[in-house]
Image: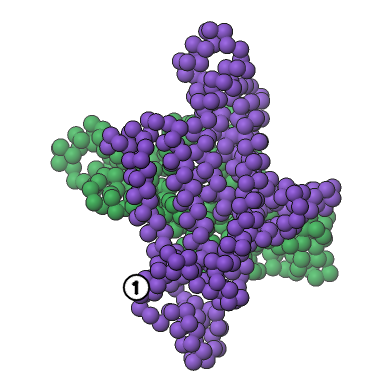
Chain colours: A purple, B green
Amino acid sequence: MSHFLLKRFMLMLPTAFGVLVLTFLLVHLVPGDPVEVLLGERALPADRDALREALGLNLPLLQQFWQFIAGVFTLDLGTSLYTKEPVSAMIAERIVPTALLALWAMCFALIVAFPLGIIAAAYKGKWQDKFAISVSLIGFSMPNFWFGPLLMILFGLWLDLLPISGMTDWSSFILPAVTLGLGMAAITSRLIRASLLEALSSDYIRTARAKGVRAQNLMVKHALKNALLPVVTVVFLQAGALLTGAILTEMIFSWPGIGSLLVEALNRRDYMVVQGTVLFIAFVYMLMTLLSDICYALVDPRIRYASEDR
Amino acid sequence: MSLRFYVVLSIALLFTSLLGWQFISAYTSEQMFLDKMMQAPSTDFILGTDELGRDQLIRLSEGVSLSLTVGCIVAVICCVVGTLIGVISGYYKGWIDQLLMRITDVFLSFPGILMAIALAALMGPGITNLIYALCLMGWVGFARLARAQTLMVREQDYVKAAEITGVSQHLVLIKYILPNIAAPLIVEFSFNMAGAMLAEAGLSFLGLGVQAPTASLGAMLREGARYMLVAPHMVLAPGLCLMLLVLALNLLGDALRDKLDVRRIERK
């Protein structure tokens, strides 16, 4: 196992470096001068030079990159051009609301996905299956920046049941979490169905059935247990995806999280905050992929032995 | 014919007639009726008007054609570039494969929509930049798929026979490998286009896409969401259109996958 972990971790290093390069290039090699964008076309040359120096943009590119890397390792992501606060502090402040929202969204997704997937697999080819597949397909195709407003109109405006913006008590979590979790619910339920069907067609299920195991027991104790493998890993992968989905969801619901920090920074053209937030989200995403692989190896020994053979 | 077929067909018919509306509509998409702002649907304005008193139906029609155009352009570029990279990687192997696949890995570990948002924002809003940004995130799926398929096909006897009889490598790639890896790529094209259209609308929703006064589904949703408490009709129609378009493409992809008998190679 330690061999696998080490190998997987080493594989991540070039990728992590690539993500750093890509984030750096996003801000530094994009056509157009950030200073001009920030100050406008009619700014005085002296002002431009001063800002360029303050941002370190007058240094050679490699040196800028070195400073950027050094900064990342000391958790110094620069200061905001707008509020003059350190970017890492701004991000730290927003982590909890986003993490809570993602957690709620995940709970919602799993609560919906399991019954849907199990019913679809149990009634394969019947109307229940078709219904479940249609629901998940619609959920999968639903843009969350439309689903959010729909929920707001229905539950906020017409029924007047739930708050529609900001983070207050538990009821304010419901609409954003449902909006964010919908896509994950759809994907996970499809996966649960597919992996249950595969498990149900295997020999040990036939044996169990021949021995006279009751249908419910067969489903829950024998099939579902084995079908859970791929689901567990996808949950981690989806958690990474939730973070990017949160950008739009948070904007719609005025949620005080990382996503709305990014959107605010984009609107103010606050390059340092954009760079820091993008880097943060990309790293969390990468971490989730890593966790998903590790989790897979933990629950399925075949993966780690395959990696040791090579 | 299956239910899926009829759903796709009716969505296609619906959108054909919506696109055709551009030619017979009495209004243009930029014509403002300032005395009729944010009106609910009526006989004059079938889908109502927006916050500047513009006819929603004609704007919707133009938004849909923009969405389809952008989705199609992005998917074609991604398909060509990604397939090229994947086929080269899988056919020649060696260091070039290693290099291309490491680059692909970096792009894979970077959430696509995040990169598109950052790029579009930093390059400045506008349709060309939007297309660049979407292409940069979309080619990876094609590259992985094309590489995996090429690795499989190049071991087939007919490819080996061609190589032994002296057919040049380029010809082998074009005449023997490409046609045999096309089926899964066609399926991927459908999903990719759906993804591109969703991403385009998402970016326009953030104000990073097409600029006013051009109509786009994302921008209409953005305005609609702003006024949704007073004029809910503004947010309903564009979102429904977007969802139906994406749904139809996903259904089409599913149907093609069953028809062409390909098991989609998952991204991870």
Quarter holding the N terminus of chain A? top left
Q: Is residue B73 visible?
A: no
Q: Residue at x 47, y 15 (%)?
A: A204
Q: Residue at x 51, y 65 (%)?
A: A276
* Residue where numbered disc 1 is placed: A62
Image location of residue B264, percent across then percent down: 44, 37
Q: Residue at x 79, y 68 (%)?
A: B33
Above or below, B259 against B241 in this view is above
For this rendering, which residue is in front, B79 or A8?
A8
Q: Is residue A40 left or right of residue B30?
A: left
Q: Quadrant of residue A293?
A: top left
Q: Is residue A144 left or right of residue A163?
A: left
Image location of residue B114, percent across then percent down: 52, 58
Q: Secondary structure at mark 1?
A: helix
Amino acid on which disc 1 is placed: Leu
Image location of residue B161, percent across then percent down: 19, 34
Q: Is residue A14 left or right of residue A182?
A: left
Image location of residue A236, percent across then percent down: 52, 43
Q: Is residue B144 left or right of residue A122?
A: left
Above or below, A92 against A285 in this view is below
- How packed mark 1 is, by other alpha carbons closer than 10 Å (few <14, some 14-19, many 20 or more), is few
Q: Is residue A48 visible?
A: yes
Above or below, B13 against B136 in this view is above
Q: Chain of mark 1?
A: A
Q: Residue at x 71, y 62 (%)?
A: B223
